[in-house]
Image (tube, grey):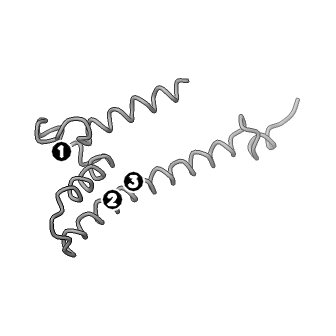
Amino acid sequence: MVVNAVGNILGMVLAFLGGAWVPLSLMPEVVATLARFTPVYWYTDALDRCAYLTDPTAEALGAVLGDIGLVALFAAVVFVAALAAGRLRVQSAAAGGNAAAALPTT
């Protein structure tokens, strides 16, 4: 239950920082700068660019694809971190991995 609550709160914070609820133009500059370090900002930017796209030039589509690429990089980082955490958990003594087999029995 705690992990679920933390996930919900983190999702709401990221949505706020990314400008999904309140436009970043209405927020202080510090918040707008901090938002650039979240994947939601780049996702929202890609959606805004697509919504106001009047002429689908290569430059305009390249900017949208660049935003989508940054979101994909965020996803890859989270995936690699999850793989590393899972690997460490499997190898821990508490999980019964190889570290548990090496413990002396009494």
Q: Secondary structure at mark 2?
A: helix
- Residue of label 2: 70
Identified by mark 1, the residue type is Thr
Spatial distance from mark 1 to mark 3, Cα to Cα?
A: 17 Å
Q: Is residue 95 above or below residue 36?
A: above
Residue at (17, 42) in percent of width and height: 32
Residue 69 screen position, x and y as percent: 35, 63
Residue 73 screen position, x and y as percent: 39, 59
Q: Residues within 10 Å of mark 3 (few under 14, many from 20)?
A: some
Between residue 103 and residue 1, name the one nearer to us.
Answer: 1
- Residue of label 3: 74
Q: In the image, is 15 to the left or to the right of 30? A: right
Q: In the image, is 18 to the left or to the right of 5? A: left
Question: Would you identify the image quadrant in which residue 72 lies?
Answer: bottom left
Q: Secondary structure at mark 3?
A: helix
Asked if the residues shown at circle 3 and circle 2 are in contact, with their CB atoms under 8 angstroms apart, the answer is yes
- Residue furthest to the right: 106
Quadrant position of the N terminus in the picture: top right
Q: Is residue 16 above or below residue 35?
A: above
Residue at (52, 29) in percent of width and height: 3
Q: Is residue 5 above or below residue 34?
A: above
Q: Secondary structure at mark 1?
A: helix
Identified by mark 2, the residue type is Leu
Quadrant position of the C terminus in the picture: top right
Identified by mark 3, the residue type is Phe
Residue at (16, 70) in percent of width and height: 55
Residue 16 screen position, x and y as percent: 27, 35
Disc number placed over residue 33 in the picture, else none? 1
Q: Nearer the viewer, mark 1 or mark 2?
A: 2
